[in-house]
Amino acid sequence: ATARASIADARDRALASAAARFGEYADRYRSNATLLAAQAQAAARDADAAQAAIAESESRLRAGAKAGALDALESYAQAKAEHAAAEEMAQQAEKEGESADAAARGRRRSSTVGAR
């Protein structure tokens, strides 16, 4: 009976020791899982912040591109208007030149007719 009690006592101690070890392992795994969950949450927050920064950057780029396009459009419109004004001035100068030529021809004719 004493041998049985000793065996039962040893078995109980071994089971208690194994249970304590498994409890320690479980606590470590729980602690690691908690740490990993916190790291995952931090990574998710970082990813959200990066995504927000990318969206802000894209928005700024779009706004800059729109502003640049508007500036280019304004420059084009101004250049086109200046070109049209220059063409009009050239046509006006051409008309004035033709008028001056006609007047000079008229004067030459009248001086030629008067000389005959």
Image: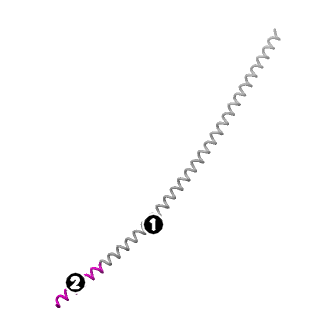
Q: Is residue 9 magenta?
A: yes
Q: Which of 74 and 86 is in front in this view?
A: 74
Residue plotted at (61% across, 45% down): 70
Q: Which element carries disc 2, helix, strand or loop?
A: helix
Neighbours of disc 1 within 10 Å: few (<14), some (14-19), many (20+): few
Q: Nearer the viewer, residue 49 or 68?
A: 49
Colour scheme used in the picture? one colour
Q: What secondary structure do most residues of the magenta stretch adopt?
A: helix
Q: Where is residue 48 in the image (x, y as percent from the top left)?
A: 48, 61
Residue 85 vs residue 29: left or right? Answer: right
Q: Where is residue 116 in the image (x, y as percent from the top left)?
A: 81, 8
112 lies above or below 76: above
Amino acid at dot 1: Ala
Q: Which element carries disc 1, helix, strand or loop?
A: helix
77 lies above or below 42: above
Foreground: disc 1 or disc 2 = 2
| Viewport quadrant of the N terminus | bottom left
37 lies above or below 103: below
Dot 1 corresponds to which residue?
42
Instruction: Give the residue at the far right of this rendering.
Output: 114
Neighbours of disc 2 within 10 Å: few (<14), some (14-19), many (20+): few
Task: Kindly indicate the quadrant of the structure image that contains residue 102.
Answer: top right
Q: Position of residue 51 (x, y in %)?
A: 49, 58
Q: Give the range drawn in magenta.
A: 1-21
Residue plotted at (32% across, 78% down): 23
Q: Position of residue 45 (x, y in %)?
A: 47, 64
* The disc label shown at residue 11, or none: 2
Residue plotted at (42% across, 66% down): 40
Residue plotted at (61% across, 42% down): 73
Q: Nearer the viewer, residue 34 or 90?
A: 34
Task: Kindly indicate the quadrant of the structure image that contains residue 105.
Answer: top right
